[in-house]
Image (cartoon, rainbow, N blue to C red):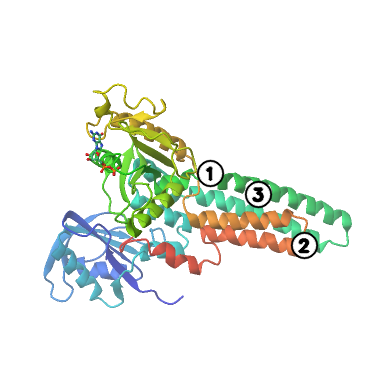
Amino acid sequence: MTQRETICALASAPGRAGVAVIRISGPGAGDALRQLCGPPPPPRQASLRKIKSPGTGEVLDRGLALWLPGPASFTGEDIAELHIHGGRAVVGRVIDALTSLRGVRLAEPGEFARRAFENGRIDLTEVEGLADLVAAETEAQARQAIAQAEGGARALYESWREELVKAHALAEAGLDFADEADVAADAAVQADAAVAKLLTAISMHLKDRGGERLRDGFRVVIAGPPNVGKSSLLNALARRDAAIVSEEAGTTRDVIEVHLDLRGLPVIVTDTAGIRAAQGAVEAEGIRRTLARVEDADLVLWMVDATAPEESSAPIQASSEPMRVLNKIDLVHSAPNAGLSAPLSAIRLSAKTGEGVSELVDILSKHAEEGLAVGEPAVITRARHRAELEAAAQALRRFRGERGGPEIKAEELRIAARHLGRLTGRIDVEEVLGAIFSEFCIGK
Ligand code: GDP
């Protein structure tokens, strides 16, 4: 292997802070430490040092130095860390001092995690778990991410891959002993039984979408005719403690979302354009997007005005029956007969006074709890995992099907094993790496 470059980066968040952590990884990490603050301290022990410019000897800051020699480090390489004062200028000067050293450069996004993967310290599902952990907004998301970062998914997928390799060996044995009919038949039966068992396990795993929902958030869409109070309800929800105001990339202007943390569960509530016969092209586009959102939603709230409840059922296509919400009940208190034609099962609230909003939040959190995989040890968290598992399952189904001779069937097991291998990154992964590591920020 060629001598790798040494990389450095700010590992903590940029901006003003009490402490900033600068990470250095690679063969030159120990030398970099020596040049800035003297001989490395004993491994894994913090040491208070003056950090000096290697050129001029000027003191840049005083901070903690840590020495984490490889291979038992996060990246598997020698790592040094400097915990310094978190001011922009201080951090900038220390980074400049480091990158002025020969063979030391600024890290690219995700490069530390990539080195950890390339040095076999973590597999791809663990890398993804780390990315999710950094991005987690709620307690349940953080729990799921840590389970994955700690190798929960890796253990399961690797055990499946081992089963598959065994089945493959049996299928190959069947080919090798093709002229000894008994042996061949016996091996084929065993291989088929092993594949059947595996296929059942993978199919069950694929059925559960709770892990992906937990990672992405349980999606609730508020739909209904114009002026019934959809935006008002979203605003009422956004003002509550549970709202996480996050600026999600890709949020369109006409579809507004609020991220709620309901008892540790992520719930994303979206307000949509009112549904009615469109008056113009812009409105028609808004309605088209609304309908698309409704189709993707885990739960649809169909809102109507309590003072003018329309009789027809919701004119939308949703994966589950929309839940009816009767808004503006503050107006019907004074007119007790109004709104009686609405179904009794509707949730009654007033986005204006806040009456009934807590009850709605309780109902949403109950639905989220049922729809999300909370505390399950290994679940599918990403479309990438689902795609690989589906491809593996398809190959296993073809193996079990009627068509194809034994050689072709053995090849199906090889295909399935390759897809499982791509999940953890054991084989053939170059093209998926870029996509995964590009999610990280610099310093991770
Ligand atoms: P949207 O078009 O469905 O998003 O409806 P808006 O949230 O813009 O509300 C339409 C009108 O109804 C506004 O004038 C709101 O102030 C009013 N409104 C919304 N919710 C309530 C409510 O619970 N009670 C009363 N009295 N008025 C409401």
Q: Nearer the viewer, residue 109 or 277?
A: 277
Residue at x 41%, y 48% (from the top left corner): 215
User: Quick one: label 2, few (<14), some, or many (20+) residues within 10 Å?
Assistant: few
Are the residues flagged by discs 2 and 1 in contact, CB closer than 8 Å? no
Between the residue at mark 2 and the residue at mark 3, the CA separation in whole angstroms equals 19 Å
**Which residue is identified by label 2?**
404
Mark 2 lies within 8 Å of ligand 1 (Cβ measured) = no
**Res 199 label:** 3
Q: Nearer the viewer, residue 3 or 413?
A: 413
Mark closest to the chain's N terminus, 2 or 1: 1
Q: Is residue 418 left or right of residue 212?
A: right
Can residue 147 be seen in the rendering of this structure?
Answer: no
Residue carrying label 1: 208
Q: Position of residue 29 (x, y in %)?
A: 31, 68
Relative placement, left or right, of 349 versus 127 is: left
Q: Position of residue 424 (x, y in %)?
A: 52, 58
> Is 182 above or below relative to 404?
above
Q: Give the mark, 3 or 1, whose residue is nearer the N terminus.
A: 3
Task: State the image quarter where residue 340 is shown.
Answer: top left
> Is the CB atom of the residue marked by disc 1 within 8 angstroms of ligand 1's nearest atom?
no
Amino acid identity at mark 3:
Leu
